[in-house]
Image (cartoon, grey):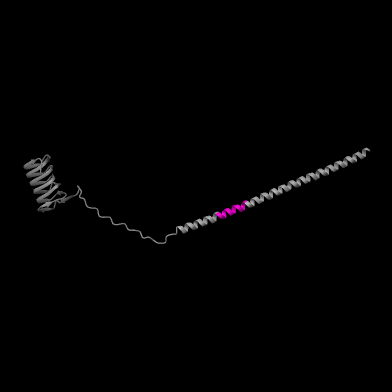
Amino acid sequence: MGTVNWLILLATVAGVMIVLDGLRRAHRDHGAGGQSSGLVKVHDGEEARAQKETQARTTSARTTSARTTSVSTARNPVMSEVVSPELPEPMPAPSRQRSDHECSLIGATLHVLGRIEADEHLIVAGRVEGDIHAQHHCVTLLAAGRIGPSVQSQRLIASGTLCGDIVTRECDTFHWGASFSGQLNAARLACDEGVQLNGRCYIGTVP
């Protein structure tokens, strides 16, 4: 066989091999493309199914919520009746209790004739001609006041003029300018400088 024939044969074999290799590559690329397309289709189907399931769950949740609200409304209907408020009962008036700070005042322009019975402290700035009975309270005589002829008290504080019988269960206190004439019975006696006392004084326990 000559050299020319060998060259022709080699060229033919090379051409056949090139064609076969091209066919094999084309077939392989076609198969890979089909598989990719199939995968894409599979993924698209799964996404569509997932979206349908999500929509179904959302619809079911809304339906359940609506049913729950409906049942709650049926069990707890709104009261349409208006209930009138109950008026509180009136509080009883507090009982009056006498305080140690309460007192009666006989003003400087008053002139009292007769008997006085006091159930509270008594302050005298005017003139009293009569008996004063305040056995459980204090009698206070101001500087311009005058009392007599009888005073019975628990305590006596005097800055004015007293005439008569004085009976005090606790203490007699005479301040500067006070004047007394008569008979005095007291458990204790206190006098400031300048007090005028004219009479008998019995200091001790007073029944």
Residue 27 placement, left or right of 59: right
Residue 162 placement, left or right of 55: left
In the foreground, 198 or 108: 198
- Identified at 49% across, 57% down, the residue is 71
Indicate the position of residue 144 as horizontal and vertical percent values: 12, 48
In the foreground, 207 or 98: 207
Indicate the position of residue 125 as horizontal and vertical percent values: 14, 49
- Residue found farthest to the right: 2
Name which quarter of the figure residue 177 lies in. Answer: top left
- Identified at 51% across, 57% down, the residue is 67
- Identified at 78% across, 44% down, the residue is 25
What predominant SS class does the magenta segment belong to?
helix
Indicate the position of residue 62 as horizontal and vertical percent values: 54, 55
Residue 148 placement, left or right of 91: left
Q: Quadrant of the C terminus?
A: top left
* Residue 161 belongs to the span the image colors magenta: no
Figure disc tally:
0
* Residue 57 belongs to the span the image colors magenta: yes
Indicate the position of residue 58 as horizontal and vertical percent values: 57, 53
Q: Quadrant of the N terminus?
A: top right
Give the residues drawn in magenta, as a range: 50-60
